Amino acid sequence: MTRNTALVTVIVFLCAALCCADTFRHRQTDEVFNGFASQKSIDNRTQVYNADLETFKPIVLAEYDVTTNLMGRRNRVIVLPLKQGEVLLSKVISDTLANAIVEASNKGPKFIVVEIDNPGGRGEYMKNICATITETFNCPVVAYISGGEFGGAYSAATTVALACEKIYISPQAVMGAFAPITSKATVYEDPQNFVETYSPKNLSAYNGYAAALAEKYNRPASVAMAMLDRKIEVIEVADRNGKRSFVNRLDKRPDESVVRTLTKTTSQSGEVTLTLTPSDAVAVGMADKVVGSLTDLLVDMGAADAKLIMAGQVDKTIRKFLAAKRNLGDVLTSVDYLQKRSEELEKQLNEREKQQMQNTVQREYRRGTGGREPYSFDLPAEPYGRSRRSRNRRYESEIVTGSEPMVNTLRLRNELALVLADLIRGYNRAIALVRRWPGTLPQDMSLQMLEQKLVAARTLQNDIVFRRSGTVAPRSSIGTTGRANRGAGYNR
């Protein structure tokens, strides 16, 4: 945790040194112009917009003294939504929002607003957006927790807000560790699955990162960590001088007295939850101010006359993500049926081949002066229970038959081969969808699991090919991809 905090702090100071440069003055030539920097660079030169010349030009920022005064910036504010539940569940969607933040900063607005009404999601996608915000040195980024379908910012979404310079919150919104069960929960089998989707337990691994973001703007680190970690109990304490602060109960010092407890225990397992109302969020220091609308936010930021631009770059990507998720669900349903069918056929085939190997065969004995010489060969079996003994002058034969299985071995092998071919196609299709759209898999599945099942299906397919040809597949010839080497004993 300490190492992560130090790393984020260094990045913050480096970015702050270059933040929102609007008036540029060259240290040696005293050249002065108004404008704004972009995040585009060529050969260590940053593309900067010169408002006087109305054009971009590459400069070395280190050679200039910069002053933040909004002069030269365009009189607009760009609003980017973090209001769909899928944003922090998909790498593609989070990348789309991150790119939208960069593109918006390059257009020179007075500032960017990330409007948040989100139940949370996965830590790696949360961190992706947070990193983009903290690295956006050329334009201020503020958060507005607006409320709506989800009622505020929860879990990973609160950490995204912490990455912003200011946090505004609506009177109808809250900041919390667990999102309430809404209509979105009907997508999942039960409420617990909904919680694990939007507030997974592995988010606790990111509590150090959240703490570093909180400390960047003097927000309580323990409260930020409790939004991600279900085992952190936050209390307000007062020292001997009466100074109050919020700490993890485990970090309470002997000279501190407990004023109140912010978190509530939710289960016998010791897990706790934290929910802050708008007034509590401001009092605790997690939010800067309660505002009733985006218009009030503009007034507080000194941009009442700015043009408000609502950007919706993520909407199209979300529609594609949801379509891919539905498609993957259909593929997984088909794969599940084919997997069970292949297991049934394999069991039947193994039993049939075992029974066939135990059948009694016909034996024929030839009579001669030197006695009789036995030899044997397989003949078609007689109906069950029938035996006969035939004799003539030259030889004697005896046929003893056992029960004949009802299912034909060859038919079983052929059907299993067809099922395996469809199963392999299904796994390949599912893997392609997951690689293209990470986050579409159910919580209890992973890409590695699909790849392992694909290998197993290919291995069995190769085994069936050898068994159909009447040989035994050499184990050493099957590699990690499940394909058999075309060596001895392989017939196509």
Image: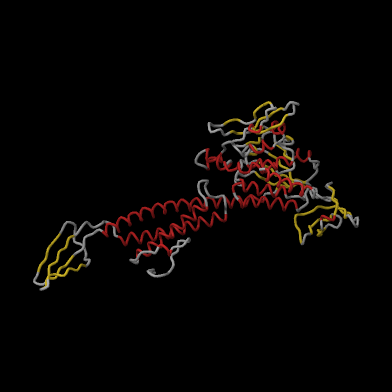
Q: Report the residue at 74% width, 42% height from top.
A: 165
Residue 91 vs residue 18, the one in the foreground: 18
- Look at the picture and state if 135 lies above or below 276: below
The N terminus: image quadrant: top right
- 421 vs 358, left or right, is right
- Look at the picture and state if 157 lies above or below 26: above
- The colour scheme is secondary structure
Q: Report the residue at 34% width, 66% height from top.
A: 471
- 437 vs 56, left or right, is left
Q: Residue 239, position in %: x, y? A: 72, 27
Residue 457 vs residue 322, the one in the foreground: 457
Q: Report the residue at 75% width, 55% height from top.
A: 39
Residue situated furthest bottom in the rendering:
369
Q: Report the residue at 21% width, 64% height from top.
A: 380
- 224 vs 58, left or right, is left
- Look at the picture and state if 351 lies above or below 274: below
- Look at the picture and state if 160 lies above or below 268: below
The C terminus: image quadrant: bottom left
Q: Residue 478, position in %: x, y? A: 44, 63
Q: Residue 427, position in %: x, y? A: 48, 56
Q: Residue 337, position in %: x, y? A: 42, 52
The number of callouts visible is 0
